[in-house]
Image (spheres, grey):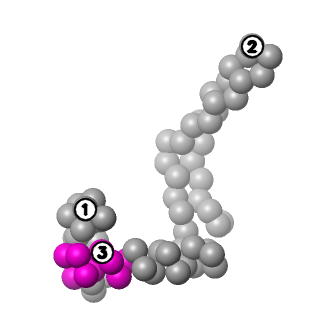
Amino acid sequence: MMNLRETGGFKLNDKGMSAGTQGALKQLESWWKGIPDFTFRIYVKEGSAVFKVNGFTKVAAFNGTFPK
């Protein structure tokens, strides 16, 4: 909440929401209600996954958008 309110305040202002607690709560509510219907995209940058099988270890890097 603090990060969204303080650091994300400029982006909240760009969306027409207040940069304080009320704007942050409004944004959190929209995410909470929109998650089941995938009403917004999620972007992953510089992700990594570690796979371990029978003593072998492999790290795979990825970027992605969900849903496409």
Q: Write the start and end of the magenta stretch as one range.
A: 18-27
The mark that comes first in sequence, 1 or 3, is: 1
> Does residue 39 appear anywhere in the picture?
yes
**Furthest-right residue in this view:** 54
Which amino acid does the dot numbered 3 rest on?
A: Ala
Which amino acid does the dot numbered 1 rest on?
A: Met
Horizontal side of residue 21 vs 45, given as left or right: left
Residue 33 in the image: above or below residue 55: below
Write down the residue under mark 2: 55
Horizontal side of residue 6 vs 68, given as left or right: left
Q: Residue 66, how many percent across, how many down?
A: 62, 62
Answer with the quarter of the image where residue 57 lies: top right
Label 2 close to label 3 by CB (< 8 Å): no
Q: Residue at x 35, y 82 (%)?
A: 26
**Furthest-bottom residue in this view:** 16
Write down the residue under mark 1: 2
Q: Residue at x 54, y 42 (%)?
A: 47
Q: Magenta region, mostly helix, strand or loop?
A: helix
Write down the residue under mark 3: 24
Q: Residue at x 52, y 52 (%)?
A: 44
